[in-house]
Image (cartoon, coloured by chain):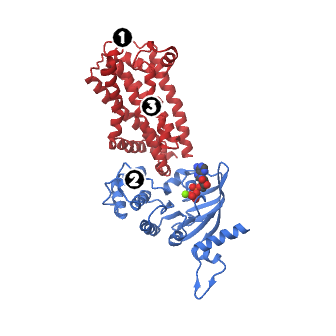
Chain colours: A red, B blue
Amino acid sequence: MGEAKTYFFRDMSVMLGRSMRHIFRSMDTMLTVCITPIAMMLLFVYVFGGAIETGTGNYVNYLLPGILLMAIASGVAYVAYRLFIDKQRGIMERFHSMPIARSTVLWGHVLTSVVSNVISIVVIILVALLMGFRSSAGVLSWLAVAGILVLFTLALTWIAAIAGLTGKTMEGASAFSYPLIFLPFISSAFVPTDSMPLIVRVFAENQPVTSIVETIRSLLSNQPVGTEIWVALAWCLGIMLVAYFFAVRAYNRIVA
Amino acid sequence: MKNAIKVTGLQKSFKNTEVLKGVHFEVRPGEIFALLGSNGAGKTTIVRILATLLKPDGGAAEVGGFDVATQPGKVRHAISLTGQFAAVDEILTGRENLILMAKLRHLDQPRQVADGLLKRFGLTDAADRKPSTYSGGMRRRLDIALSLVGQPQVIFLDEPTTGLDPEARIEVWKIVKELAGSGATVFLTTQYLEEAEQLADRIAILHEGRIIANGTLAELKSLFPQAKVEYVEKQPTLEEIFLAIIGKKEVV
Ligand SMILES: Nc1ncnc2c1ncn2[C@@H]1O[C@H](COP(=O)(O)OP(=O)(O)O)[C@@H](O)[C@H]1O
Ligand SMILES: [Mg+2]
């Protein structure tokens, strides 16, 4: 057992290398992850944008945080897919019958999810720059934005891991992501919440996406973040810890 | 080490179904041991317990001299598992699959190990292709090759020929026979009596949660009382022995 521990980092890098190869061998999946949010961004900016009153001059600036969250919400679905495949094809059992640090089987996929989502976020930000996105944020604010996005990615990745580890079918394992992808629509990601009917508005203003979007928006436009950032962090950390707990529990059931 | 595998009183239930009701057997180092049983008999369950993937409800099991419950890490060093369905990474090439295994076994020269196995299993030409382009037999060969990385002492093959065409089956038989020559212990499960007859030094028959017969082919044949005397004496096939034993138990 002690021996498996000493190999943790070595096994981890092997597992990470494996699933990163999966990512780079299937660039089409990467593209899919980027293309939908970019298409949404184009649609909102060039089709609906003129009709949406956000109170800020630059609608791309207003829109980008929500688009990034949407990209992450659809990007994490691949963790569910890859874990499901490993479980179903017996690859997980093969790994578990080997003298390795077992937890790296799970962590390899989780870290790969973070890396691949960071890549798609960078791509989307570059496209946004072409479309007129501008930010006056300093290095610290950008670091804070990066930190929040990584936390959000981890939180959703662990949710995806639960689905991948417990799903009985491929459809079941990936169905979880649809509500996640649509959460930004019922938030202040695309339009301010003021115009929404009361019930929708109460939901929109109190769900995690709104606080995270508003925090990122403030950071990028160099505005004070107020207490919103703590609400956003609490949501990210809370979701992450709860999802982590259930994912590890599901994983240990498989490992037995 | 007297036994490569020693199983005593193994019990396992899933919800309300009692799958293993006290399984006993021993496997000597270097032999090919076949666990024979029909579909759903509990063969995979036994393999998973021995490979430290599943905890038994009762009884004990030792593999390579180590207890599966208390020293699973040591057991994993000693074994390899080839599951019932080929567990190969579809996105990596054949060679990369082997290198992955070599790295996870912490071997010094993963690439050389991979090349050696590719050659031995006639996969050198297919080495840089994905397994999705392989035939069923090639996939199974790669799958078994993955299990041999690091030269484990005890090799588990769970129904290695199920779903293969006759030609591929003969290929796998050849590989298994060669494995025995290398000094490793091979524990294989099968539903095919002929396969057990062909490959195994010793055969145990698992039926309704227990081992109902265990011995060499000759010993199993001697269990069968009425050697038919016809024009020439006909040796009973294992199938007849199997049916006879099961028949007897069910009458009792
Ligand atoms: N994880 C499980 N949960 C519930 N039942 C199971 C599980 N694994 C196996 N079984 C049941 O145990 C019995 C034996 O299964 P198995 O060991 O796979 O048989 P075999 O490999 O001999 O075909 C079957 O009836 C099967 O349905
Ligand atoms: Mg089976």
The residue located at (39%, 23%) in the rendering is A66
Count numbered badges in the picture. 3
| Relative image position of residue B222 (x, y in whole percent) | 63, 78
Do marks 1 and 3 share a subunit?
yes
Q: Residues within 10 Å of mark 3 (few under 14, many from 20)?
A: many
Q: Kindly state the secondary structure of the residue where label 3 is placed.
A: helix
Vertical comparison of A184 with B45: above or below? above
Q: Is tag 1's residue or tag 3's residue first in the polypeptide sequence? A: 1
Disc marking residue A185: none
- Looking at the image, can residue B62 be seen? no
- Left of A252 or right of it: where is A79? left
The residue to which callout 2 is attached is: B102
Report the image quarter containing ligand 1: bottom right
Q: Are marks 1 and 3 in contact (CB under 8 Å)?
A: no
Vertical comparison of A23 with B187: above or below? above
The residue to which callout 1 is attached is: A55
Name, please, the residue furthest toward the right: B252
Q: CA distance from mark 2 to mark 3?
A: 30 Å
Q: Kindly state the secondary structure of the residue where label 1 is placed.
A: loop
- Left of A31 or right of it: where is A182? right
- Looking at the image, can residue B180 be seen? yes
The residue located at (34%, 19%) in the rendering is A48
Q: CA distance from mark 1 to mark 2?
A: 59 Å
